[in-house]
Amino acid sequence: LVARTRGLDRLRSRAAGNQSIPTPRTPPAEAPANPLAETMLSERRAGLKNALEKLEPLQREAIECSFYDGLSHGEIAEKLNKPLGTIKSSIRQGLIRLRDLVRT
């Protein structure tokens, strides 16, 4: 998580003059070492996708903007036209709910 945050900070600082930072909507794929690892990774992705679909729309969208688009909380608040505190709460509550959904 720290490496991801630092990487995003570097991208943002390099693109300070540029208004938009092109980032993928899907998380980067990791190359599995073997078929078993590939199957397990596929199952984890499917489980996470199902869990994301069970979240409230604001929680899901805020989490997707944060983790898939790499936006900061302030950028998400601006994009979704919601107060910053609401976005922070939505992300935190959504992550807690995701954790519980993925564990079961």
Image (cartoon, rainbow, N blue to C red):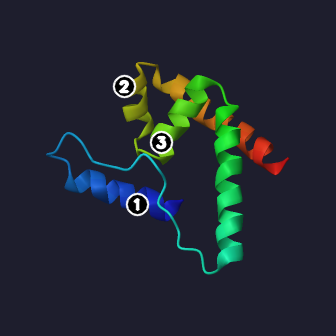
Q: Secondary structure at mark 2?
A: helix
Residue ID at (21%, 56%): 14
Three-letter amino acid code at the position of disc 3: Ser
Residue 44 position (above or below residue 95)? below
> How many discs appear?
3
User: Which numbered disc covers residue 6?
Assistant: 1
Reply above or below: 34 against 61.
below
- In primary-sequence order, the first of circles 2 and 3 is 3
Q: Residues within 10 Å of mark 3 (few under 14, many from 20)?
A: some
- Front residue of 46/15: it is 46
Q: Residue flagged by tag 2: what amino acid is it?
A: Glu
Q: Name the residue beneath numbered marker 2.
A: 78
The quarter holding residue 78 reads top left
Residue 92, above or below 34: above
Q: Quadrant of the N terminus?
A: bottom right
The alpha-carbon separation of the residues under discs 2 and 3 comes to 13 Å
Classify mark 1: helix, strand or loop. Answer: helix
Residue 34: x percent and y percent? 64, 80
Looking at the image, is mark 3 or mark 1 nearer the viewer? 3
Q: Nearer the viewer, residue 73 or 79?
A: 79
Residue 2 in the image: x percent, y percent? 50, 61
Return the residue found at the far bottom: 33
Residue at the spot of label 3: 66
Residue that appears at 47% across and 42% down:
66
Q: From the top left corner, tell me how far across and down residue 87 is, in percent.
A: 52, 28
Determine whether, in the image, residue 78 is placed left or right of residue 60: left
Query: Looking at the image, which residue is at 50% across and 63% down?
Result: 29
